[in-house]
Image (cartoon, rainbow, N blue to C red):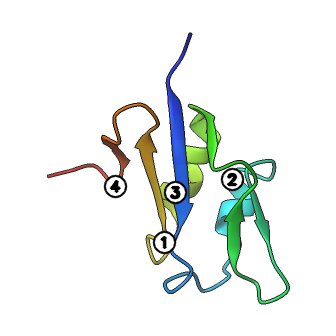
Amino acid sequence: MGDRWHVEVDRSLCIGSAQCLHHAPDGFRLDSARQSHPVDPDTDANERVLEAAESCPVEAITITLGDSGEPVFPPEE
């Protein structure tokens, strides 16, 4: 069984660029205010969701391991 992730979008940072939708169309949705939301905040580890987080121009998307809360993206330095 693979890792489970918890995905969050900081709506105070989100600018509605829709880069997340471009990279992971099944993983994110924009609301009427063009704010991004994860379709399923608790999801299986997924390369497309990671690409979406990495492509966000304002780094509004965070991913943590579901069981431990350890950061996946952005990585701890």
Residue in the picture at 70% in, 80% down:
35
Q: Is residue 76 above or below residue 16?
A: above
Is residue 2 left or right of 65 when viewed as pictured?
right
Is residue 27 left or right of 32 when viewed as pictured?
left
* Residue 18: x %, y % from top left: 71, 72
Compute the Cα span from label 1 to label 3.
Answer: 8 Å
Furthest residue toward right: 32
Q: Which mark is residue 23?
A: 2
For label 4, the residue is 74
For label 1, the residue is 60
Report helix, strand or loop for mark 1.
loop
Compute the Cα span from label 1 to label 2.
Answer: 15 Å
Q: Say few, some or many: other residues with alpha carbon within 10 Å of mark 1 (under 14 / 14 to 19 / 20 or more).
A: some
* Residue 19: x %, y % from top left: 66, 67
Compute the Cα span from label 4 to label 1.
Answer: 10 Å
N-terminal-most mark, 3 or 2? 2
